[in-house]
């Protein structure tokens, strides 16, 4: 019984600052205590819970003589405070664990999203590779077949007209448009300046070949004494060359838009270049399709071959021109908003 009184005295003596101090100090004290101290306090608390009376007061004496009485209500308040502090600690631990779990879940979710984005990029690249392989195959296939047909029997002045026209529009101009639209697998990761350089370089070479082809057909007509621009193919060809030259001129003003900003707004020069280039490309594709059905080409190619070539040409045009048309529509809307 005396041992129990001593334990009660020590516990009350150690619990007095607990009631005075704040909960934060108590938490810090509990965290800095060692395992042996926690075990001893736990045993003392169990012994006191077993021997404390429910009602009345409990008087005990120590080495100093009589000690003040401690009522059961004070003991209950002491243990209630202790339980509250333990509950706070458990809530903090659960909150920390929950936060760590949420952080882990967030990291896993972000990792999964990044993996899906990476997978989507790989899938997009594969689709882009397949599309470019198909389109490039059609470009070189159609241009190569027309070139072979031009030089199959003999090399004459007229042979250079279909050859340079098909190479200029189907290959060079298509590649130039794809470079700027971002649909070219070999250049879609290049810097914008590199794309601009490749665009105007390909367009310049295409313009040279188209000009040579136009001169060849004109001189051939003069040599044979035939009238000019009498067929639908010839009329479309003339309009196509005019729009192509206008598009090249618009490209020059677009390239030096900053230097020419005092004479024409850059947005207007870009818009004019986009419209002229789109129209010129569509007219060029139409002219080549009409050339496939010309009298010269029909002599050695049946209807199935001509239809196959036209389908291939239309497929190339659709892949090349869809993105530029969409960009052109957005640029028109922007120009209207900034002007009005």
Image (tube, helix red, strand yellow):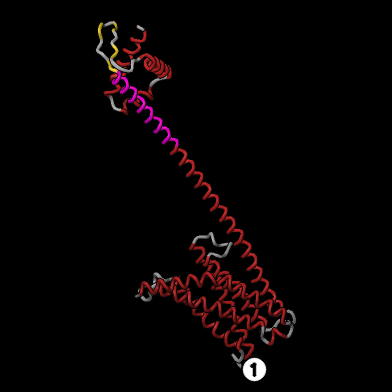
- Is residue 60 in sight in this rendering? yes
Q: Badge 1 local density, few (<14 within 10 Å), some, or many (20+)?
A: few
Q: Is residue 37 visible?
A: no
Task: Name the one closer to the observer, 55 or 192.
Answer: 55
Where is 336 relative to 111, above or below?
Answer: below
In the visual, does 14 lie left or right of 109? Answer: left
Report the magenta stretch's main SS. Answer: helix
Q: Is residue 200 above or below residue 216?
A: above
Residue that carries the numbered disc 1 in the rendered image: 225
Q: Picture coordinates of residue 68 (x, y %)?
A: 24, 12
In-front residue for pair 232/314: 314
Assess whether residue 86 is covered by the magenta stretch. Answer: yes
In the picture, measured across the screen, residue 182 lies left or right of residue 134, that is left
Residue 26, percent from left and from top: 33, 25
Magenta highlight range: 72-97
The quarter of the rendered structure image containing the C terminus is bottom left
Residue 128 location, x and y as percent?
A: 59, 62
- At 45% from the left and 70% from the top, the residue drawn is 330
Residue 30 belongs to magenta span: no
Q: Secondary structure at mark 1?
A: loop
* Residue name at image x 37 percent, y 15 percent: 48
Total marks shown come to 1
State the residue in front, 95 or 171: 95
Q: Quadrant of residue 144?
A: bottom right
Q: Position of residue 230 (x, y in %)?
A: 60, 92
Q: Quadrant of the N terminus?
A: top left
Is 111 in front, or is 185?
111
Q: Residue at x 36, y 72 (%)?
A: 338
Q: Is residue 334 left or right of residue 108?
A: left
| Among the 4 quarters of the image, the one containing residue 267 | bottom left
Measured along the vertical axis of the image, is residue 215 above or below residue 254?
Answer: below
């Amino acid at each position: 019984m005396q041992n129990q009184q001593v334990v009660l005295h020590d516990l009350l003596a150690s619990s007095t600052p607990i009631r005075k101090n704040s909960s934060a100090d108590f938490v810090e004290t509990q965290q800095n205590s060692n395992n042996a101290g926690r075990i001893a306090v736990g045993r003392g608390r169990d012994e006191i819970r077993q021997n404390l009376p429910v009602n009345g007061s409990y008087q005990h004496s120590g080495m100093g003589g009589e000690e003040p009485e401690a009522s059961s209500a004070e003991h209950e308040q002491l243990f209630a405070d202790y339980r509250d502090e333990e509950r706070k600690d458990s809530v903090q631990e659960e909150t920390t664990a929950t936060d760590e779990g949420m952080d882990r879940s967030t990291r896993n979710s972000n990792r999964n999203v990044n993996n899906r984005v990476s997978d989507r990029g790989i899938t997009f690249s594969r689709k882009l590779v397949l599309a470019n392989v198909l389109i490039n195959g059609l470009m070189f296939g159609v241009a190569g077949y027309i070139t072979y047909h031009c030089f199959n029997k003999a090399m004459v002045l007229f042979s250079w007209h279909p050859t340079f026209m098909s190479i200029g529009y189907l290959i060079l101009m298509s590649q130039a448009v794809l470079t700027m639209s971002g649909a070219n697998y070999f250049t879609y990761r290049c810097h914008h300046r590199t794309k601009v350089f490749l665009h105007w370089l390909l367009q310049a070479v295409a313009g040279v070949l188209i000009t040579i082809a136009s001169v060849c057909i004109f001189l051939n007509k003069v040599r044979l004494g035939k009238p000019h621009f009498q067929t639908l193919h010839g009329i479309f060809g003339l309009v196509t060359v005019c729009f192509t030259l206008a598009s090249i001129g618009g490209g020059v003003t677009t390239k030096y838009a900053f230097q020419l900003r005092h004479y024409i707004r850059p947005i207007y020069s870009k818009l004019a270049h986009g419209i002229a280039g789109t129209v010129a490309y569509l007219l060029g594709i139409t002219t080549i399709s009409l050339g496939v059905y010309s009298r010269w080409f029909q002599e050695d190619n049946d209807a199935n071959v001509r239809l196959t070539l036209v389908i291939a040409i239309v497929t190339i045009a659709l892949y090349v021109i869809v993105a530029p048309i969409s960009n052109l529509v957005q640029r028109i809307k922007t120009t209207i908003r900034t002007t009005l």
